Amino acid sequence: MSWNWQTPDWPNFKWDRSRMAAAEEQFLVGAGVVIGTAKHLGEDERNQLLVEVMSGEALTTSEMEGEILNRASVQSSIQRQLGLAADKRRATPAEQGIAEMMVDLFRSSAEPLSNEMLYRWHRMVASGRRDLIDIGRYRTGKEPMQVISGRIGAQKVHFEAPPSKRVPSEMKRFIAWFNQTVPQGALPLPAITKAGIAHLYFESIHPFEDGNGRIGRALAEKAMAQSFGQPLLVALATTILAHQKSYYEALEKANKQMDVSAWLTWFADIALEAQRRTITQVEFLIPRQSCWTACAATSMTGSRRRFCESSGKARKGSRAE
């Protein structure tokens, strides 16, 4: 079986751009609503939203890798990292590490991607691990890096990554692509398209001994934030966890070919659902009238105004339940 990185076209992904147009527009509208209404939150409410979204992402991205963390401990760690009031609750190395990565992701959203940033994130997600050889650096093992399932003797290989010796050159090319596809770059891509390809591209290389899923999902969120020039709160990992089975199925299909149209269509649905989850969180922190104030202040018309109106109706209905 051949993998995408073994094809002659690697890493020149292909996709049907017309299939992404409507989703990109909808995501742009939703981002405007989130950013506009969030500005009308008080400082306490903004901090509450930030901690809730970050901790939710930290918990769910870890859960997908089999780590069940304590919500209160993760929230307390995030609050301390942000300089907010927090209790003196002790956190495990895993809880502290993922909290540090989420805050670093938020604070460094505008910075170009680099090896050093990825190494830093890996040290955070691997905090407390004693079973790994390569921490804070790309993998060096000679054994094939495979994603497998099933009992011994009847295992299924879902994916095999490039050999370790290829990882430095593959990551050099990936980082260059990531930085060239920002809005001001030489090859700009819209938010969902960039995030979806970045996640698949990174997972296809699988550069670390462990922690690739968590870092790959963080990269998708970084890509979205860079598309809007500011940190962007999107419950991406939370939504992926809700569709975990189809997530792995979509990734497995995508890593065997260079046409990623189907993967991007799946990812777009997830990104839009994630955005709706975030909008719901914002709505419960901001009075409905303030949402309309935000709409008026940003001169929202057409599809943006309809989006705000539908969001307000949805919130009114949820409060009545």
Image (spheres, rainbow, N blue to C red):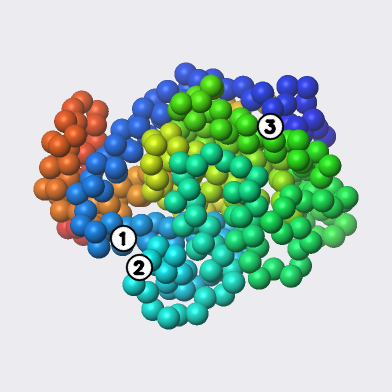
The residue type indicated by label 1 comes to Asn
Along the line of sight, the residue nearer the viewer: 200 or 136: 136
Q: Secondary structure at mark 2?
A: loop
Q: Secondary structure at mark 3?
A: helix
Decide which of tag 2 and tag 1 comes sooner along the chain: 1
Residue 52: x, y in percent?
37, 61
The residue type indicated by label 2 comes to Leu
Determine the residue positioned at 53% across, 21% down: 186
Image quarter of the N terminus:
top right
Residue 173: x, y in percent?
68, 32
User: Residue 74, can we see it?
Assistant: yes
Residue 99: x, y in percent?
50, 63
Q: Are marks 2 and 1 in contact (CB under 8 Å)?
A: yes
Quadrant in which residue 204 is drawn = top right
Residue 64: x, y in percent?
58, 57
Decide which of tag 3 and tag 1 comes sooner along the chain: 1
Along the line of sight, the residue nearer the viewer: 277 or 87: 87
> Mark 2 or 1, which is nearer the eye?
2
> Does residue 151 lie above or below 303 as drawn?
below
Image quarter of the C terminus:
bottom left
> Does residue 268 lie above or below 19 as drawn?
below
The residue type indicated by label 3 comes to Arg
Quadrant in which residue 75 is drawn = bottom left
Q: Which label was assigned to residue 173?
A: 3
Q: Are marks 2 and 3 in contact (CB under 8 Å)?
A: no
Q: Secondary structure at mark 1?
A: helix
Residue 255 horizontal side relative to residue 22, left or right = right
Q: Which label was assigned to residue 47?
A: 1
* Residue labelled with disc 2: 84
